[in-house]
Amino acid sequence: MMPGMQITSCRYISIRNKSCLPSFGKGLLHRLFLLAVIIILVVVFCFHTVDGRDIHVALTELKPSLYTDEQGKPSGFFVELIEDCGAEEEWNIIWVSGSLYESWNRLDSGEIDLLPAVTITSEREHFYDFTNESALSIWSQVYARPDSGISTILDLDGKLVAMVRGASSGIAFRDYAQKFAVNATYLEKNTPKEVFSAVAAQEADALVVYNSAGQEDSLEYGLIATPVMFNPALFGFAVKKGKNQDLLKSIDKYLADGKKNPSSTYSLAMQKWYGIKTEELISPWLWWVLEVVAGLAALFLIMSYILRREVRRKTFELARQNEELQSEIKSRIRAEADLLDKNKEVYAAYEQLAAMDNELRENFLELRKNEKALMEARKKLSLLNALTFKDIKNTFFILSGYIQLSKDAGSIEEAQFCFTKEEQILHSVEVTLSFIEKYQNLGINQPKWQKILYVLLNAISHLDFSKISRTVDLPELEIYADPLLEDVFLAIMNTITQEDSAVTHVSIRCQQNMDGIIIMVESDGTGIPKEDKENIFSWEQAAVGGTSLFLAREILSITNISLQETGEPDTGIRFEITVPKGEYRISDA
């Protein structure tokens, strides 16, 4: 045979030989098994490599929103949301602790991917992207010690206010204070606990944080929430501009689904951390009824194969109607829950608007009062300028006469006499100009609330009261007057000490009546004659270097306060300052 024919014959024989089949089948099965194992390992390895994306999330100290608990673990409302959302999205959450200021810098540098519990501002939108769904509605609140007396934004003028570094609540407060011309000093700290500790230790007068951060810390540090609230905002999540957009989409979907379901992790966390309760969509007993109904439906389906076709049709129809009813019930419960949440939000917004309306009304009345006082001050300045011009004009007329007399003098003695008169006239002009210079700022600065006791003590400090005893019986009284109020009391006390050298005692007290309050400054001594009681308030007395009671009366009249002398000539001097209602207030302290 030829070689080719031998090979063909051998192949034919090997195929026909049954003893050869087991060996060939075993090899093929072995290869298929190895291939299947390799495919399974590749699939498992691929799934393992794509599963568990690392997400670096900022952990700031903003209790109860998010913080580090006593065991050093992340805790809080936003922690529960991120952990639950991360479990659904198969994220590996890596928490990065730090202050809010540090976290913003880390988000800029890419050290973290996500920053929770932040608000949207126009400045931040240039550099960051935010979730469309908000996790929580908040507002900025001012907290202080119970005895601070802070009830409006105006009470923070000149105060030291603590705030969290990098927080939009502090940025919004600076703008809010600037709108009302409130000049406050600011102290920045890294965490809410540090700002609460600073106020409790009297390192600062007040602090501003979001109300969500102040609920627990205010109780812990013995502080109270003042009526000063502003800047309503929405708490959400932030990423770097143009980065990690898939994180925002996943969180938006998670929040939207959670708000629709009162039994979701989102709703339960709201109830746990902020006390906002929600109703479950379906109560447990209704789930049990649904399970029973489903079981009965299954039983009817099984029995339908045995019973007549009509019974099976009716049973199927009953099951379909029951499902429609349950769907309608779920829709109505969901709509009621949404409506309840909306009502709560509207009511909270209404309360905030009502508070803002009251504050605006008070500010409007204050501005009207300032405007009226400014108009009065302008009238006083016009009168003062007219009187001054008239006096100076008359003085220079007299001066020119003496100059002419000195020119025509026939002897040195006559010229010397004229020179002496001229010198006296120039001195009186100098006194008048000095007097006018002192009161040129009358009405320039708007009136303000001033404590009488402090103003009185400052006025007395300019005079020699070493030989005069005094009695002060005044409550915590404040009056609304021009900033030159101290000069009023200085003029009164100067008159008492100069008019009667026999004065040994001065008393200051007040008396309320239906129209307002009267502040009385009384002394012993001989007093002022009746014919001179009004003369002491005349312009002529002030212009010649008198006690300036003329200006004292003008200063008080800017805010409708009157001044008069009512003492008996033989019993001493008594000045009465009558303050109408609305222009004074007495503190509870």
Image (cartoon, rainbow, N blue to C red):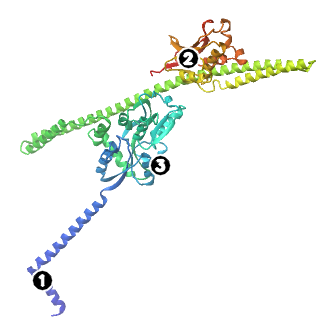
- Could you classify mark 1 by the number of other residues whose Cα lies within 10 Å: few (under 14), some (14-19), or many (20 or more)? few
Marks 3 and 2 in Cβ contact (< 8 Å): no
3 or 2: mark nearer the eye: 2
Give the percent coordinates (x, y) of residue 503: 61, 13
Which residue does the numbered mark 2 point to in the structure image? Answer: 470
- Could you classify mark 2 by the number of other residues whose Cα lies within 10 Å: few (under 14), some (14-19), or many (20 or more)? few
Marks 1 and 3 in Cβ contact (< 8 Å): no
Which residue does the numbered mark 3 point to in the structure image? Answer: 127
Asked whether 33 or 541 is in front, the reply is: 541
In the orientation shown, which residue stands out farthest toward the front? 467
The amino acid at mark 2 is: Arg
- SS at circle 2: strand
1 or 3: mark nearer the eye: 3
Quarter containing the N terminus? bottom left
The amino acid at mark 3 is: Phe
18 lies left or right of 582: left
